[in-house]
Image (cartoon, helix red, strand yellow):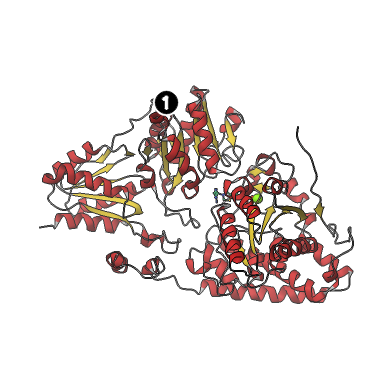
Amino acid sequence: MTVSFKFDSLQYLDTDGAVVFEPLPEWANDAAILIPLYRTMVETRAFDAKAVALQRTGQLGTYASSLGQEAIGVATASVMTADDVLLPTYREYGAQFWRGTTMAEILLYWGGDERGSDYAGPRGDFPISVPIATHACHAVGVAYAMKLRQQPHAAVCFVGDGATSKGDFYEAINAAGVWRLPVVFVVTNNQWAISVPVSKQTAAETLAHKSVAAGIAGRRVDGNDCLAMKQAATEAIDNARNGRGPTLLEALTYRMSDHTTADDASRYRSAEEVDAHRLQDPIDRLRRYMESRGLWADAEEQELHDATAQRVEQQVKVYLDTPAPAPQTMFDHLYATLPRAFDAQRQAVIEEK
Amino acid sequence: MPEVTLVEAVNTALARAMGTDENVVVLGEDVGVNGGVFRATAGLQERFGEARVIDTPLAENLIAGTAVGMAAHGLKPIAEIQFMGFIYPALDQLLSHASRLRTRTRGRLTCPLVLRAPFGGGIHAPEHHSESTEALFAHIPGLRVVIPSSPARAYGLLLASIHDPDPVVFLEPKRIYRIVKQDVADDGHALPLDVCFVLRSGTDVTLVTWGAMTHETIQAADALSSAGISAEVIDVATIKPLDIETILESVEKTGRCVIVHEAARSGGWGAEISAQIMERGLLSLLAPVQRVTGYDTVMPLFRLEDRYMPSVDRIVQAAHATLGFE
Ligand SMILES: Cc1ncc(C[n+]2csc(CCOP(=O)(O)OP(=O)(O)O)c2C)c(N)n1
Ligand SMILES: [Mg+2]
């Protein structure tokens, strides 16, 4: 017998930004809350377009775009405190920017420079995890440490839909349940893992269903509805911090871009499918909502775009002006103190011209 | 004969194997509809169907473990790991099962699988996409580790790996996936496994390498030749089991040996080759064996990768060091 049950998806706003579900959270009328969310999403998108352009002109390595997914990271990070720990994938710049990782740092990373992972802002955050789902287990470890050290914080781990097929992910949610850890797994379900659609990853009805076997809370949310995303993240992180256990939060979205700049998505999905998702855009949606409430106007929009363009240019300049590291720096952080055994190799790197 | 790149030769060999043996299946991430992120499996799903060219869920342990089960039960799986950097969840299956199923069951169950993965640096790829850890696999008893260095050898060695009754880890140097084209007849002829290929004969120094580094090594041999030094170049190809005889014969003739690999130095496969030369060819050596390798650091991100990888210059200098030894 197959047991069947539903995970409804939390959504407040339709694609026009009209309210379809009430009551709205109290802060949903607060410009001081909404505008920073909106601003960071706009900045993330502007950054993204610039990064793709840099890659196309040979000034950046392969880059993974977050186009269309900005609300998930930004809204989630907006609920985190500085002492919480973020464990991101390569597509959550919105969350990283909110927490103070800089655009220049992200560019350095994709530009082939380790210094891009030495975040000046959030010192405890993990670097981008490229080996899929491996960091889900790190989140368990971080949350365990928080619990043991009696810190009222949470670990927030982002993974993709594809990542939920990996053993690491199951192992992590299972252990998080056993130890009732202060951790939230945000599954950014953008429908695709490179060329593989979710329907080929799992026969489970939703990814939130995977929470059931792990014995942890499961939740689905419209990840392109910034309000719903913030509300769902608020509840999940609040539960984590207050000893009410972990949550698997499935955030529904769509990968508007190619997988990375090295990919050509037209090989496996149609332009019509992509176009159909333009309507869902999280930035347009929040703007329309704010406009409808009189919280935002054209003049402010123009000002934001100008300021954002300047900010991105300034960060690109920081990136491009960063000289390449000296070759021997490849030994600098290998151990706390470089053992003598490496002296000869380090010298050889210096001497080789 | 068609001129093909290394990755096209892989594709041709896969198609040939699938066309001649219906038990051959291909599985991995993005291998079907997308034809592989490097196009190695392009067109196979259209030709042979979804049941035989399988887009798996994103799970490398699954891919390798499934291949073990398939191989033990009559299929010939060719599994693709998208990049060597993501092969490590599969290591458990290779080490604990694929390599020893025959031994454990006294030959009752066997594991004729091929696990393919692109590897190596030099293409300015993101983090985790540039390492060369072939020695990890070569260390495992019961595995074969095969590394082609040209389109022709990719075709012939892959067919041989597919025909082989034991598990083969087939590592494809992605830096040279597309840099040269070669005439490769799709005639179904396999090349022999477990033997080195002598790419160039010479009398003064033996240069031993494999994979993408054959290119720098040949260039080094050219540079040495301009200086009046005759270098023999050996492409090891099957690094495990190692054809030490061919290397020893060469060293007997030249008295000098330089081993070149991209991988980190300590415990790299060059160490094994060097040890075997000491054990069996010490008296033919006129100079200590030299190694030109990556450093014992984490593979740097790409701004420094050129400084990490062995250069033609470093190879030439090492050859000179063997010649200048007194
Ligand atoms: C363990 C592992 N296997 C394979 C890859 C290659 N790869 C990079 S991204 C990706 C798809 C990931 O899909 P998903 O988890 O849905 O995240 P998305 O890229 O959609 O954000 C794959 C297969 C990898 N990085 N890590
Ligand atoms: Mg995805």
Q: In the rendered view, does B8 fall on the left or right side of A30?
A: left
Q: Is mark 1 within 8 Å of ligand 1?
A: no
What is the quadrant of residue A90 in the picture? Answer: bottom right
The residue sitting at 81% across, 62% down in the picture is A285
Q: Which residue is mark 1?
A: B188
The residue drawn where x is 71% and y is 41% is A204
The amino acid on which the numbered mark 1 sits, given as a three-letter code, is Gly
- Please indicate, yes or no, whether residue B92 appears anywhere in the rendered image: yes
**Quadrant in which residue B160 is drawn:** top left
Percent position (x, y) of residue A26? 85, 70
Q: Position of residue A78 (x, y in %)?
A: 71, 69
* Vertical side of B42 occupied by A184: above or below: below
* Location of the N terminus of chain A (image quadrant): top right
User: Picture coordinates of residue A334 (x, y %)?
Assistant: 40, 65
User: Is B11 on the left-hand or right-hand side of A145?
Assistant: left
Considering depth in this image, is A69 or A89 the residue closer to the camera? Answer: A89
Q: Is B109 left, or right, of A132 in this rendering?
A: left
Picture quadrant of residue A306: bottom right
